[in-house]
Image: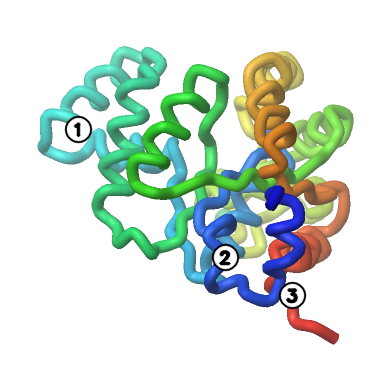
Amino acid sequence: MTTRSFIKGCLKCFKFNKMFSNLIFFGMQGSGKGTQGKLFAQKYDYQVFETGKELRKIAQEDSPLGKKVKEITEEGKLVPNEVVMEIVENFVAHIPSEEKVIFDGLPRKEEQRVSFEELLARFDRKGTGVLIKITEEEAIKRLTSRKVCEKCKAIFGAGYEDAVCDQCGGKLISRADDNLESIKVRLNEYQKQTVPVIEKYREEERLIEINGIQGAEEVAKELEEKLGVAESE
Ligand SMILES: [Zn+2]
């Protein structure tokens, strides 16, 4: 049975559908994949593995791994793949095997995809990709118009018109790292490194594609429909 027919055939037995026990969220910066992943996780009881967050968490631990990560990040270096895998392994090994996981922020490149897949397989897990699709133009539009609250650091998208934060009244400023040059560097990196990874999941028919150029609620709804958890009308 191919994955595609398996996905279709199992719309009604989501709870038992192992294909969806490990979701890997892909999408350009600005696609909203992080937010969508968190919302879906909350609603459908998934653990979230967010690479950046896990790295920061580990760096504060008084363990050999924690010290290693702290050292690397303090020197401003990129965390090597084997260390990232150690952290993923640490995470997966400490949760029950029936626990569902959403992975956000990896695999980013081919080398990482291979080791990530091997690691999941060792824990009897297999990932299905979820791609929140937007165009580069849309990503640039969203990222350059993003503002952040000076006080509470809340992030506001293009649609938010007020000059002050609706949570604390703080002043909204442009995000320092959201200038056009660095956005283009990041998008370029995504095209070169991550798109081939996504291609691989598509080839293996393990990819669910969602239109990211619509409101957040519509994205969430399409996600639920395609993962077979939408309530039938
Ligand atoms: Zn604020």
Q: Which residue is mark 2?
A: 17
Mark-to-mark CA distance, 2 and 3:
15 Å
- Amino acid type at image mark 2: Asn
Q: Residue furthest front?
A: 1
Query: On screen, 7 above or below 53?
Result: below
- Amino acid type at image mark 3: Ala
Specify whether residue 175 is in view: yes
Image location (x, y in percent) of residue 84: 36, 28
Q: Residue furthest bottom?
A: 233
Please say which color scheme the image uses.
rainbow
- In this rendering, position of residue 180 left or right of residue 103: right
Q: Residue at x 58, y 56 (%)?
A: 19
Image location (x, y in percent) of residue 26: 65, 39
Q: Secondary structure at mark 2?
A: loop
Q: Which residue is mark 1?
A: 66
Q: Residue at x 30, y 39 (%)?
A: 89
Image location (x, y in percent) of residue 214: 87, 54
